[in-house]
């Protein structure tokens, strides 16, 4: 990464003229790399994309630069996410320099054409079961599993035309586009944090929060409103944030570890409570080459009766501080 993330942020306290000169210099460096199709980090892509988008100079169009595609996709996906096929004919607005404007039908159709193209492109990627990049491998695998569940729904499984209907294709596209968006965000997350932010410790045992952990949790336990089928999963809401999830988990596990309540206890299941809400972390032993390591497999809030009864029956709840309590196996 040529530039640190904080260098790519606008400083509101700086002299406006000097700040404009500074950011333009960064833009010119990134532009030269973009033209030469050299590597740009996701944050550099975002900075450059915004520069091209709002430039009043002759810097070309977003479509002229391959590196602008991920930022463009992320922006348009969030604009249309709740009505990704525009079946509801919802009012569509976009922000331009802190002002929201209503998008006209012609622009909507152009945007939807682009998103459909991205869906078809991502479907081809998802079908591939052998990706060298681990994050892409996990993203594709998770998406294939969700699409498999969609096909199992009776209205598609029991009808020979089911998976060829507009209804199925629209849901398939929604799943695929959400998957691509998660992948793009995950790229940023791994860029923005350092390796120690993805490692926690309990009882002297390291727990790794890796590509599998992030993709699994983001896809299965966030953004319930965007799901195209009932996944029977519980979902995070306000407390836990995707972009800092690994560090939030690390902080909580550090509090639990410091309390010594789980000393000499198994850590395959780590259950705790924050502000009266129960949560469960599952970890497991995995093999990488000749070495074993412990991976954080999933993390979710407990909201079904079965899981609550398991906690009540098999664990005792011990208060650590005003916010965090931990479940100790009986």
Image (tube, rainbow, N blue to C red):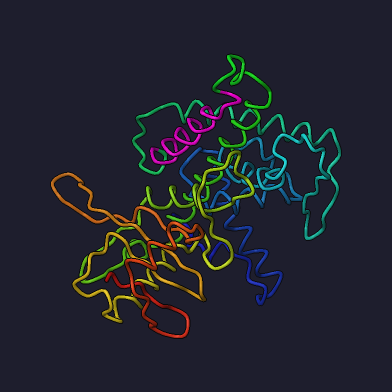
* Rendering quarter of residue 115: top right
Residue situated in front as seen by the camera: 283 or 154: 154
Q: How many marks?
A: 0
Residue situated in front as seen by the camera: 93 or 220: 220
Span shown in magenta:
137-156
Residue 154, position in %: x, y? 57, 27
Q: Is residue 154 magenta?
A: yes
Residue situated in front as seen by the camera: 50 or 294: 294
The residue most toward the top is: 160
Q: Quarter of the image containing the C terminus?
A: bottom left
- Left or right placement of residue 279 versus residue 166 in this view: left
Residue 176, position in %: x, y? 56, 35
Is residue 293 positioned above or below 175 on the image? below
Residue 40, position in %: x, y? 49, 47
Residue shown at 73% from the left, 44% from the top: 58
Q: Main secondary structure of the magenta part?
A: helix
* Rendering quarter of residue 195: bottom left
Residue situated in front as seen by the camera: 17 or 162: 162
- Left or right placement of residue 260 versus residue 102 in this view: left
Q: Is residue 246 magenta?
A: no
Is residue 255 positioned above or below 69 on the image? below
Residue shown at 23% from the left, 65% from the top: 266
Q: Quarter of the image containing the N terminus?
A: bottom left
Residue 274, position in %: x, y? 48, 74
- Left or right placement of residue 126 versus residue 116 in this view: left
The residue most toward the left is: 290
């Amino acid at each position: 990464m040529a530039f640190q993330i904080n260098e790519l942020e606008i400083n509101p306290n700086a002299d406006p003229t000097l700040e404009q000169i500074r950011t333009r210099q960064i833009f010119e460096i990134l532009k030269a790399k973009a033209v030469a199709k050299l590597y740009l980090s996701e944050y550099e892509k975002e900075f450059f994309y915004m520069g091209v988008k709002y430039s009043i100079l002759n810097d070309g169009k977003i479509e002229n630069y391959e590196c602008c595609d991920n930022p463009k996709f992320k922006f348009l996906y969030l604009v249309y996410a709740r009505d990704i096929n525009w079946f509801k004919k919802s009012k569509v607005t976009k922000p331009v320099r802190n002002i929201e404007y209503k998008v006209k039908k012609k622009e909507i159709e152009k945007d939807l054409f682009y998103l459909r193209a991205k869906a078809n492109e991502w479907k081809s990627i998802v079908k591939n079961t052998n990706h060298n990049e681990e994050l892409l491998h996990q993203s594709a695998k998770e998406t294939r599993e969700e699409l498999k569940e969609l096909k199992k729904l009776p209205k598609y499984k029991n009808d020979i035309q089911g998976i060829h209907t507009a209804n199925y294709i629209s849901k398939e596209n929604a799943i695929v586009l959400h998957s691509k968006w998660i992948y793009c965000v995950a790229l940023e997350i791994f860029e923005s944090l350092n390796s120690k932010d993805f490692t926690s410790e309990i009882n002297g045992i390291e727990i790794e929060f890796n590509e599998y952990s992030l993709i699994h949790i983001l896809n299965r336990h966030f953004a319930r409103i965007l799901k195209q089928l009932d996944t029977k999963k519980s979902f995070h809401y306000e407390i836990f944030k995707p972009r800092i999830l690994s560090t939030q988990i690390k902080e909580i596990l550090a509090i639990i570890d410091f309390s010594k309540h789980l000393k000499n206890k198994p850590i395959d299941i780590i259950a705790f409570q924050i502000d009266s809400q129960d949560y469960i972390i599952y970890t497991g032993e995995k093999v990488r080459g000749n070495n074993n390591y412990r991976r954080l497999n999933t993390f979710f809030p407990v909201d079904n009766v079965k899981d609550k009864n398991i906690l009540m029956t098999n664990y005792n709840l011990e208060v650590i501080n005003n916010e965090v309590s931990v479940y100790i196996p009986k």
